[in-house]
Image (cartoon, rainbow, N blue to C red):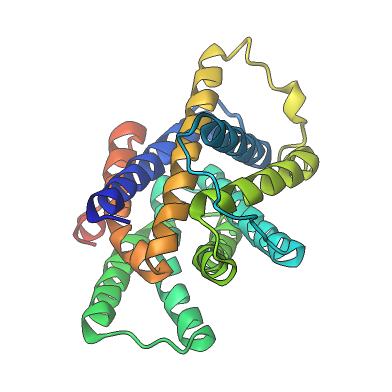
Amino acid sequence: MTTMTSILHWLLNIFSSVSIIMVNKQLMGAKGYNFNFPTCLCALHFLVTFAMSRIGMHVGVCPKADKQVVFPSQDLWIYTIVANGSIISLNASLMLNSILLYQIAKLAVVPFTCCVEMVWYGRRFSPQVSFCIALTLFGMALVSISEMQISSSKIGILMAGASIVTTSVQQMLVGHYQKVHEISANDMLAKTAIMQGSTMLLGGPILDSAFNNRWVHEYSFATQPRALWFLLGSCGLALGVNISQFFVLGKFSAVTFQLIGHLKTCLVLVLGWFFFSGFVTDTQMMG
């Protein structure tokens, strides 16, 4: 992977990751279009990703595998369960919490990932990386102190906590399985996206109805015509997130992914304040 290709993948990841949060907040938020069906939305994301991945390989945009791709069913199920838990808890956290608290919870993935990599892989971090992690944690603490007091619910905090654990493990599994099974990012994405989309599509309506006391088919796009455009935009951005994440995590570690992704946090906080009239204190701004 060339340096320029790596940069393009990072730029795609930053743009799509930040944009999809804004789009989903407007789509699912109570002050937006109130499409509060996060699991069904995730199912659409992965089914679109799978379809576009297959089309890309068919027309030659995405490279085909040079050999028969083998992804053991046990590993596929492990990844699917963890990844589904990650994306569902992330979207539920975004729906229930403010953008600020949602993004701060994502920052907590950094120390959790470090702990897991030290225990799992026996990895040790250089003083420079340790300093970056400590600085990130300090900023995270400054931002989150007042936010936790102002706008939080028990279920929202629970979803935020679940997203920290599952997201960290999911990101490590992406790089781990690509190396162990010697498969490309596109091949792994094609294998996992259909499994994630199918399982979410089967269980999504039930899970979402438990949250909302209504079924997804009861939502009327006729009364909210713009919601459909936001839904399509969300699926398109999810494609960018999934593709770029698999390529980046296949090359870099999960810790590097999270530390460089701190830029996404700054962008999300600023854009969240701008678009959704959030209140940012001086302490939070310094963080």
Question: Looking at the figure, which quarter contains the C terminus?
Answer: bottom left
Q: Residue furthest front?
A: 66
Foreground pick, 179 / 239? 179
Q: Quadrant of the N terminus?
A: bottom left
Query: Where residue 172 appears, x then y in whole percent?
Result: 51, 68
Which residue is drawn at the image coordinates 33% and 35% (left, top)? Answer: 277
Left-right relation of 106 to 87: left
Q: Is residue 170 visible?
A: yes
Indicate whether 53 appears above or below 261: above
When asked about the image quadrant of residue 33, the answer is: top right
Quarter of image, res 282:
bottom left
Q: Residue furthest top?
A: 222
Percent x, y of residue 210: 77, 43
Q: Is residue 27 left or right of residue 260?
A: right
Name the residue: 55% across, 38% down. 53
Answer whether residue 25 is visible to the viewer in this image.
no
Is 42 left or right of 205, judged from the image as shown?
left
Q: Position of residue 22 (x, y in %)?
A: 41, 36
